Image (cartoon, rainbow, N blue to C red):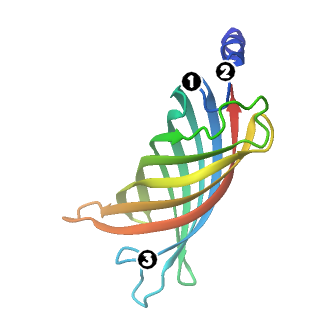
Amino acid sequence: MTALLFLAIGAAAQDSPVDKGSFMISGQASYTSLGGDLFEDYAGNSINLIAINPGIGYFTTPGFMIGGDFSILHASWSDDADATLIGLGPKIAYFFNAKQDRTEQKGAFYPYIEAFGQYFSVSLGNNDASAFLYGGKVGFISMITNSVAIDAAVTYSGLSFKPDGADDSISGNILSVGVGLSQFIW
């Protein structure tokens, strides 16, 4: 309780949700169609991917955030094949504060760029694998209240996938569009 009171007092002196000392709790969901050698099956069908990405971040300076994401990915291909992957990793982002002289945050618009990486441990039946996802995101948040924002972004990711015992990993790319919500504690 004391820690929450300390955070609330420190946050009261901030001018915007992307100011130093703010916390951001986010969640984004996306649908993706994947291609490339890693993602096409023997018949040339691509993979459909649904992703849920909750995350947390802390603004160390105005606009600059460090944090982490947790990911749940569900992939399906052909009529009867699917897999679920769970990953964790760090992220950094920069939010551009378009209007610093706002007195109310509702309606504010903050474009951002983000870089991230995530490690996945994958179990596919009797086979295990490891995967590393890395990439960048370009998007914006639009404040719908003084502390809640709609988040929309386009993400480009590379994925390196290596089954246990294999000499080489195979790779592919992911391009996705996602929307979500962000809660700021500032």
What amino acid type is highlighted by mark number 1?
Answer: Lys
Labelled disc at residue 35: 3
Residue 12, picture quadrant: top right
Mark 3–mark 2 Cα distance, whole angstroms, equals: 44 Å
Q: Residue furthest bottom?
A: 43
Q: Is 62 or 103 nearer to us in this picture? A: 103
Residue picked out by circle 1: 20
Mark 3–mark 1 Cα distance, whole angstroms, equals: 39 Å
Residue 80, relative to residue 4: is it above or below? below
Mark 1–mark 2 Cα distance, whole angstroms, equals: 7 Å
Q: Quadrant of the N terminus?
A: top right
Q: Secondary structure at mark 3?
A: loop
Q: Quadrant of the C terminus?
A: top right
Q: Badges 1 and 2: C-beta atoms under 8 Å apart?
A: yes
Residue picked out by circle 2: 14
Mark positioned earlier in the residue sequence (3 or 1):
1
Residue 6, relative to residue 172: is it above or below? above
